[in-house]
Image: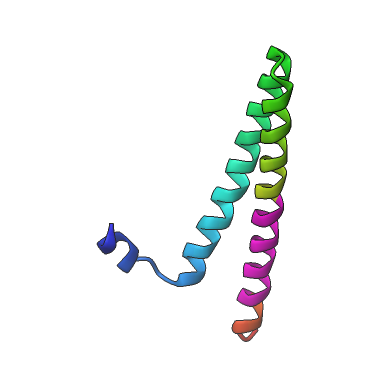
């Protein structure tokens, strides 16, 4: 694990991977909430939908910050 992290090209790449994982987890929680709603577990559906929304927002904000700092740090 540590050797894999040491061979990554930049820390920006690692942060982008975390942002992608947050967005993916947000989508997974939304799918779980839809399935739970269909099965009648509305309390679980509400909790997972809220968690999914939070993960999506954090992931998108993190991705935007990474993109902005990526362009600011490199000259054209």
Q: Is residue 74 above or below residue 14?
A: below
Q: Residue sitting at 58 percent across and 42 percent down?
A: 25
Is 48 left, or right, of 13 in this rendering? right
- Looking at the image, which residue is at 64% across and 61% down? 63
In the image, 58 versus 71, the foreground residue is: 58
User: Which is the main secondary structure of the residues drawn in magenta?
Assistant: helix
24 left or right of 8 in image: right
> Residue 50 lies in what quarter of the image?
top right
Q: Which quadrant: the C terminus?
A: bottom right
How many marks do you count on the picture?
A: 0
Image position, residue 6 (x, y; %):
31, 68
Q: Position of residue 10 (x, y in %)?
A: 44, 72
* Quarter of the picture holding the N terminus: bottom left
Residue at the bottom extreme of this rendering: 75
Q: In the rendered image of this protein, does residue 47 appear above or below residue 60?
A: above
Q: Is the image coloured rainbow, by chain, by secondary structure, or in one colour?
A: rainbow
Outermost residue to the left: 3
Q: Is residue 68 magenta?
A: yes
**Picture quadrant of residue 49:** top right
The residue under the point 27% across, 62% down is 2
Q: Give coordinates of residue 71: x percent, y percent.
A: 65, 77
> In the displayed structure, would residue 55 be above or below residue 4?
above
Residue lying at 34% horizontally and 63% vertically, measured from the top left:
5
- Quadrant location of residue 72? bottom right
Which residue extends farthest top? 39
Q: Which residues are magenta?
A: 57-70
Residue 59, image x, y percentages? 64, 55
């Amino acid at each position: 694990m540590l050797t894999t992290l040491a061979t990554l090209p930049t820390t920006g790449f690692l942060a982008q991977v975390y942002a992608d994982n947050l967005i993916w987890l947000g989508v997974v929680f939304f799918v779980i909430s839809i399935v739970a709603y269909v099965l009648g577990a509305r309390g679980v559906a509400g909790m997972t939908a809220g968690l999914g929304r939070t993960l999506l927002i954090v992931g998108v904000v993190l991705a935007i910050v990474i993109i902005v700092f990526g362009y600011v740090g490199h000259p054209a």
